[in-house]
Image: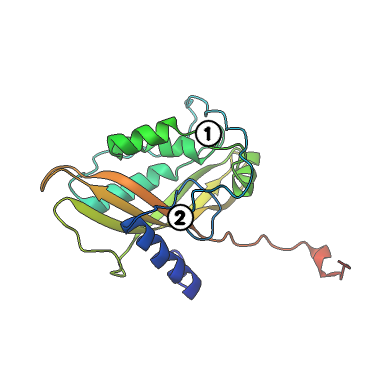
């Protein structure tokens, strides 16, 4: 198992799946959220948007996923996750750049929405740590087969995934990459046609704390 299924994570997963299968889908682009939110009201003032990422160079490390069977909802969802969480901080300004590389598998409506979206500046502490090493990320994707998702119909399917990533610095550093429980809604026009991703919701996993420095053993007043 890639991510611990502790009680808190299980509750968050059920909440996320309920949001995905119903109304008021929480936006997976709200990075750092410990649980999905259905509120459309920002809690802080909006920030300036991030600039787009740079064109990928010859030394870019991003997934190249070919030969995906798009009539298999699970295979398509896993392929999407590998691309969407395959960041290269030397070229990407934030996670949204990788998400756009995965837009080939979205519905036209979803793809248009993502391409018109401009994420706020400040990609988060994890991203800043990766970027300080010009790191790229690779992920292992495991299907969540606990049986909480609704049964597939001919034109609608849901898939739950566990994403567990590693960051690889160009300076030789390695660290924890993106980690999340991801829930994917897939649709198609009729039985036998290719699936497309209509919506996604993510419950980010907590990043393990870094080892404390030796000086931390000394008591310090608040």
Q: Is residue 68 above or below residue 11?
A: above
Q: Residue furthest left?
A: 191
What label sits on residue 30 in the rendered view? none
Identity of the residue furthest to the front in this view: 41
Which residue lies under the disc numbered 1? 92
Query: Percent x, y for residue 5?
Result: 44, 71
- In percent of the image, x 34 and y 39: which residue is there? 110
Taking the spot 43% from the left edge, 52% from the top edge, the residue there is 26
- Structural crowding at the residue carrying mark 2, measured as other residues with C-alpha within 10 Å and reported as few (<14), some (14–19) or many (≥20): few
Mark 1 and mark 2: span between their CA atoms? 28 Å
Q: Which residue is nearer to you in this view: 216 or 53?
A: 53
Query: Splitting the image into 4 quarters, where does residue 48 fall?
Result: top right
Query: What secondary structure is found at the residue carrying circle 1?
Result: loop
Q: Secondary structure at mark 2?
A: loop
Residue pictured at 45% horizontal, 43% vertical: 86
The answer to which of 145 and 8 lies nearer the viewer is: 8
- Label 1, residues with CA under 10 Å away: few <14, some 14-19, many ≥20: many
Q: Position of residue 122 (x, y in %)?
A: 62, 40
Query: Which residue reaches farthest right?
Result: 221
Q: Where is residue 45 shown, x and y percent of the image?
A: 64, 42
> Which of the image's four quarters has the N terminus?
bottom left
Nearest to the observer: residue 71 or residue 43: 43
State the residue in front, 126 or 60.
126
Query: Which circle marks residue 38 in the picture?
Result: 2
- Decide if residue 172 is in sight here: no
- Whether residue 146 is situated above or below residue 129 in the rendered picture: below
Estimate the x, y position of residue 25 in percent, counting from the top left: 39, 52
Q: Is residue 22 left or right of residue 165?
A: left
In the figure, is residue 178 to the left or right of 134?
Answer: left
Q: Is the C-beta separation of discs 1 and 2 under 8 Å?
A: no
């Amino acid at each position: 198992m890639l991510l611990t299924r502790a009680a808190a994570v299980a509750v968050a997963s059920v909440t996320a799946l309920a949001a995905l299968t119903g109304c008021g889908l929480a936006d997976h682009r709200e990075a750092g959220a410990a649980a999905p939110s259905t509120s459309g009201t920002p809690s802080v003032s909006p920030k300036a948007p991030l600039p787009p990422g740079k064109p990928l160079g010859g030394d870019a490390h991003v997934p190249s996923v070919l030969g995906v069977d798009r009539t298999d909802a699970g295979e398509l969802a896993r392929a999407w996750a590998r691309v969407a969480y395959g960041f290269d901080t030397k070229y990407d300004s934030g996670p949204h750049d990788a998400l756009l590389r995965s837009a080939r598998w979205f519905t036209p409506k979803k793809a248009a929405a993502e391409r018109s979206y401009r994420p706020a500046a400040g990609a988060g502490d994890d991203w800043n740590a990766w970027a300080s090493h010009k790191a790229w990320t690779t992920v292992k994707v495991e299907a969540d087969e606990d049986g909480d998702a609704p049964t597939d119909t001919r034109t609608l399917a849901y898939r739950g995934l566990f994403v567990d990533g590693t960051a690889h610095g160009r300076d030789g550093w390695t660290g924890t990459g993106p980690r999340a429980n991801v829930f994917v809604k897939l649709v198609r026009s009729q039985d036998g046609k290719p699936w497309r991703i209509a919506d996604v919701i993510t419950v980010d996993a907590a990043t393990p704390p870094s080892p404390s420095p030796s000086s931390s053993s000394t008591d310090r007043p608040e």
